[in-house]
Structures are given as structure tokens and as C-alpha cells.
Amino acid sequence: MPELLAHFALAASAFLSATLLPGTSEAALVATATEWPGAIVTLFLVATIANTAGSIVNWWLGSHVERFAGARWFPVSPERLGKARDLAQRYGWWTLLLAWIPVLGDPLTLAAGLMRVRFLPFLALVGTGKALRYAAILWGLSALG
């Protein structure tokens, strides 16, 4: 696979992984970084930006959840969304740093939209958490050799 195509594939994987759809952006990042170690900075940026963009979609959906809550395709149960909202209310905006955590992160970003968290703080916290996660993955990969 050419390097540019690998970047696009990583972007798609990272974006979808952050939305309500399942994905494996970590595995895609490791695979592309292993294949193209000289492109580690651009791979890091692509994964971080695309994954954050997917969370922005969740935030937008959360801000419009009343319209979507009854839809059959909407994959977050009211219970999971309620737990995420309770966690966010209990610990505040800082919980958005944990938006990268599988299963919990998507409802957290939806809850942020539902709670009308302003966009710039949302973007800063979610983007920072996701960047730290990808940096840790790439650091671990480099430490392994």
C-alpha cells in the first residue's frame, strides 16, 4: 500500500473508531508506523486529528440527541448515555480527557453535546487526551524496537 493511501486508511480508521461505530485505530496506527517509521509525525497527526473529528461528530449528535434518541440506528442506550452524563456531571469537563477509552469515550462525547459543553473546551480536552494516547502508543512501539 502506498504511503499516502496508508495515511488515508489510518484517517478513516481513526475517524470511525471515535464515532459510535466500532474501529481499531490503535492497530492501524501501529501497522502504519511499523511500515513507515519515517512518517511517524504525520501518522500521529492524522490519527489524532481524525479521531478527534470523530468525537466532534459524537458531540454534535449529543447536542441533537433528542431528535435521534428514538431512532433504531442510534447505538447508545439511554442507560449508557445516562451513566456517561452522571460521570461528566460528577467530575466535570476533565472527564473529556478520557474520551479515548473504548466503550466509555463515545458516550462521554455524546454526553458533552447533550450537556451543551462549549465547543472549544471540548475540542481542547478531547484532542489532548487522544493525542496523549497516540503518543503513548507510538512511544511504546519505539521502545519495543
Image (spheres, helix red, strand yellow):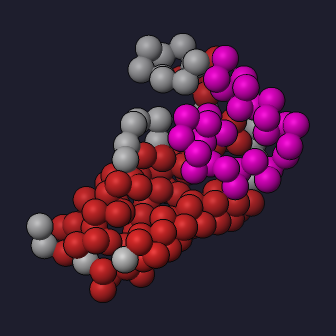
Q: Position of residue 141 (x, y in %)?
A: 41, 70
Image quarter where the N terminus lies is bottom left
Residue 127 seen anywhere in this rendered image of the structure = no
In the rendered view, does 82 fall on the left or right side of 60? right
Residue 15 seen anywhere in this rendered image of the structure = yes
Q: Position of residue 95 (x, y in %)?
A: 75, 48
Image quarter where the C terminus lies is bottom left
In the rendered view, does 4 fall on the left or right side of 61? left
Compared with residue 72, is residue 5 higher up or lower down, i.e. above or below?
below
Magenta stretch, main secondary structure, is helix
The residue most toward the left is 1
Compared with residue 81, is residue 114 higher up or lower down, i.e. above or below?
below
Queried whether the magenta region covers residue 32, the answer comes back as no
- How many numbered tags mark residues here? 0
Residue positioned 62% across, 48% down in the render:
99
Compared with residue 125, is residue 63 higher up or lower down, i.e. above or below?
above
Quarter location, residue 144: bottom left
Which stretch did the figure color magenta?
79-108
Residue positioned 75% across, 53% down in the render:
118
Q: Position of residue 108 (x, y in %)?
A: 66, 39
Residue positioned 13% across, 73% down in the render:
2
Compared with residue 71, is residue 133 higher up or lower down, i.e. above or below?
below
Q: Position of residue 66 (x, y in %)?
A: 63, 23
In the rendered view, does 30 fall on the left or right side of 60? left
Queried whether the magenta region covers residue 98, the answer comes back as yes
Front-lying residue, 141 or 54: 141
Residue positioned 42% across, 46% down in the render:
17
Front-lying residue, 118 or 2: 2
Quarter location, residue 23: top left
The residue most toward the right is 90
